[in-house]
């Protein structure tokens, strides 16, 4: 099995991989957030046994009393916060670490690009700022 050498990879291939990953990473991060949100909601949803049940009380003559609010103790018991399981805490810590690592990697990437293109006076966001400034001069308002 031959190894990939630096000489066998063209600049066009490298740029196409770079552009492909730059265009896909927001969708991937959004997908990870949505999947995490859904899994978290399903895993931590209360089961039917924990729901507050209000029984209809009967008044004189066996007639039901009008509906009234739940007692304060039932409301307190229903909304009492429960601690997360160790597995949920570990999952949250792992996802948080991955997100922080992604931000740090992005910062390192920007720093490397700034150092690499130092002689061209390149800085992060340069093309976006030039585009916004240029369009504001010709907006007509």
Image (cartoon, helix red, strand yellow):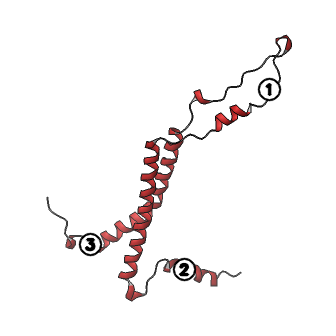
Q: Is residue 31 positioned above or below 70 on the image?
A: below
Give the mark nearest the N terminus, 3 or 1. 3
To which residue does mark 2 refer? Answer: 129
Rendered location of residue 125, percent (x, y): 49, 77
Q: CA distance from mark 3 to mark 1?
A: 76 Å
Residue depth check, mark 2 versus mark 1: number of the one nearer the observer: 1
Residue at disc 1, secondary structure:
loop
Q: Is residue 104 positioned above or below 92 on the image?
A: below
Residue 123: name its quadrant. bottom left
To which residue does mark 1 refer? Answer: 67
Q: CA distance from mark 2 to mark 1?
A: 62 Å
Give the mark nearest the N terminus, 3 or 2. 3
Please say if the residues under marks 3 and 1 sit with CB atoms less than 8 Å apart: no
The structure residue drawn at horizontal position 19% and vertical position 65%, both measured from the top left corner, is: 4
Number of marks: 3
Residue depth check, mark 3 versus mark 1: number of the one nearer the observer: 1
Q: Quadrant of the C terminus?
A: bottom right
Q: Residues within 10 Å of mark 2 (few under 14, many from 20)?
A: few
Looking at the rendered structure, which numbered label has been put on residue 10? 3
The structure residue drawn at horizontal position 80% and vertical position 16%, both measured from the top left corner, is: 58
Rendered location of residue 109, percent (x, y): 39, 72
Residue at disc 2, secondary structure:
helix
In this rendering, position of residue 3 left or right of residue 135: left
Q: Which of the two residues, 76 or 40, is positioned nearer the viewer here?
A: 76
């Amino acid at each position: 099995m031959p190894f990939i050498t630096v000489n066998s990879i063209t600049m066009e291939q490298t740029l196409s991989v770079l552009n492909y990953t730059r265009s896909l990473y927001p969708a991937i991060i959004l997908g990870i957030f949505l999947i995490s949100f859904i899994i978290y909601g399903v895993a931590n949803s209360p089961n039917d046994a924990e729901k507050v049940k209000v029984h209809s009380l009967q008044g004189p003559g066996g007639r039901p009393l009008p509906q009234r609010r739940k007692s304060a103790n039932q409301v307190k018991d229903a909304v009492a916060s429960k601690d997360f399981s160790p597995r949920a805490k570990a999952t949250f810590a792992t996802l948080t670490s991955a997100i922080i690592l992604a931000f740090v990697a992005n910062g390192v990437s920007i720093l490397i690009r700034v150092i690499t293109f130092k002689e061209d006076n390149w800085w992060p966001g340069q093309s976006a700022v030039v585009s916004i400034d240029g369009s504001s001069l010709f907006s007509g308002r």
